[in-house]
Image (tube, rainbow, N blue to C red):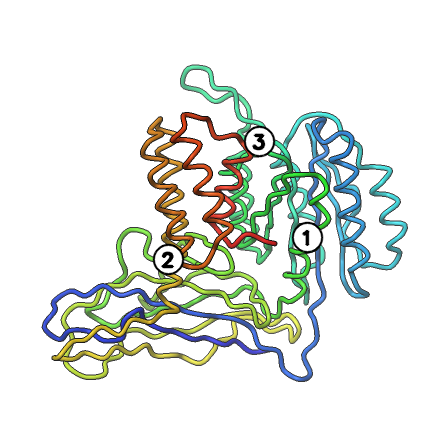
Amino acid sequence: MKVKLLSALNDNNVDVAQTNSQRQLAMTIFAIAGESDRNLPLNLCLILDKSGSMHGQPIKTVIQAVEGLIDRLKVGDRISVVAFSGTAEVIIPNQAIEEPESIKSQIKSKLTASGGTAIADGLELGITELMKGTRGAVSQAFLLTDGHGESALRIWKWDIGRDDNKRCLKLAQKAAKLNLTINTFGFGNSWNQDLLEKIADVGGGTLAHIEHPEQAVEQFSRLFGRIQSIGLTNAYLLLSLVPNVRLAELKPIAQVAPDTIELPLEPEADGSFAVRLGDLMQDVERVVLANIYLGQLPEGKQAIAHLQIRYDDPLLNEEGLLSPLIPVYADVVRAYQPTSNPQVQQSILALAKYRQTQLAEAKLQQGDRTGAATMLQTAAKTALQIGDKGAATVLQTSATRLQAGEELSEADLKKTRIVSKTVLQE
């Protein structure tokens, strides 16, 4: 399994007379399978909400979705199941797939809904189970909840008890360091979208919305298909800039495909930057966009950055592998004419759609309904520019409701968040 790394600037030409030029650098990364490569074994943990609000049809459809996943697991794959309500318990300890019908039977008998929503307890147990089967495998968790988690009780200046949400984020960070990926599923319309998005983003995973119970099977299946295509793990983008070239100070780098995520930078000892990508899928592009500033450069073809991917290959049991070092060039010219790259422009607009929607949500939380409606309309127009008609419809509908003096429902807010991050699934 090898890494493919491509790069492009939104405008490859730079005016030699300019002392400061802004450019967007798009980096495309994916895994390429060789003739002898096979699919990696999966180490999958399902962390499932069994609180009282999941009683009835919700828990039945979740069990059906879980059974569908178990049927798709192969010899060599591993499964574990954790359930949480007011507390968490391991229903299926981490084990190789040998008797799938027995596993399904245990889940059916043990997954009964009652109690509160201690998400962090479930996440902690799930990480523990995943760690038992990481060797030579792709380790992923599916975290499903329909609730908000339990907050600490605040009395004057003191927090009494544990804050579930803070613990969740710390656990997601721990998972990322252990090369575990956390995917989150919001079930219904009462879950905490800020929390589940942050857990997925920090954990290198995907946020999905199961609005109606009957969508559970489809959403689980869709994401399972994605993780089956993973070829390499623990990938980092290494970015080194030449003197007189710098990253933007505010939000300098973000992923724009397959989902939009603001990415943190980690400084390396040699002065370069590392950006965690996590798992790389075969032939599915991971696109990262960096906002950079170029100082005045000499005329001619100039190297402005160097790129490399550091990754693990579980199939070969090799860690810390490095792809070839790739230079990024700009053409510094006297007779400047812009040379816009349409593909990079699409990535810029995808990120703009996400950030415009974020601004709209912030304005709505501040009580500025007019400002929120305006930003949602702007985001809808941006979505149309990139051909994302589904997102445009959702965003424009929410803007129209605000302009008409209506409140946005929990379902509206969830849909808005999902379409801001990715293209709607059919």
Q: Earlier in the sequence, mark 3 or mark 2?
A: 3
Q: Quadrant of the C terminus?
A: bottom right
Q: Quadrant of the N terminus?
A: bottom right
For the view shown, which residue lies furthest in the left direction?
17
| Image disc number at residue 130 | 1
Q: Residue at x 38, y 31 (%)?
A: 403
**Horizontal arrangement in the rendering, residue 383 relative to residue 284 (left or right):** left
Q: Earlier in the sequence, mark 1 or mark 3?
A: 1
- Please state which of the two labelled residues, at mark 1 or mark 2, is closer to the viewer: 2
**Spot occupied by residue 28 in the image (x, y as percentages of width and height):** 45, 70
Cα–Cα span, label 1 and label 3: 24 Å
**Residue 58, relative to residue 385: is it above or below?**
above
Cα–Cα span, label 3 and label 2: 32 Å
Q: Amino acid at mark 1?
A: Leu
- Please state which of the two labelled residues, at mark 3 or mark 2, is closer to the viewer: 2
**Residue 241, relative to residue 406: is it above or below?**
below
**Horizontal arrangement in the rendering, residue 65 relative to residue 116 (left or right):** right
Q: Which residue is mark 2?
A: 349
Instruction: Evaluate if marks 1 and 2 touch, with contact meaning CB atoms under 8 Å apart.
Output: no
Q: Residue at x 26, y 57 (%)?
A: 248
| Image disc number at residue 148 | 3
Q: Amino acid at mark 2?
A: Leu
Q: Amino acid at mark 3?
A: His
**Spot occupied by residue 48 in the image (x, y as percentages of width and height):** 70, 40
| Image disc number at residue 3 | none
Near-viewer residue (73 or 317): 73
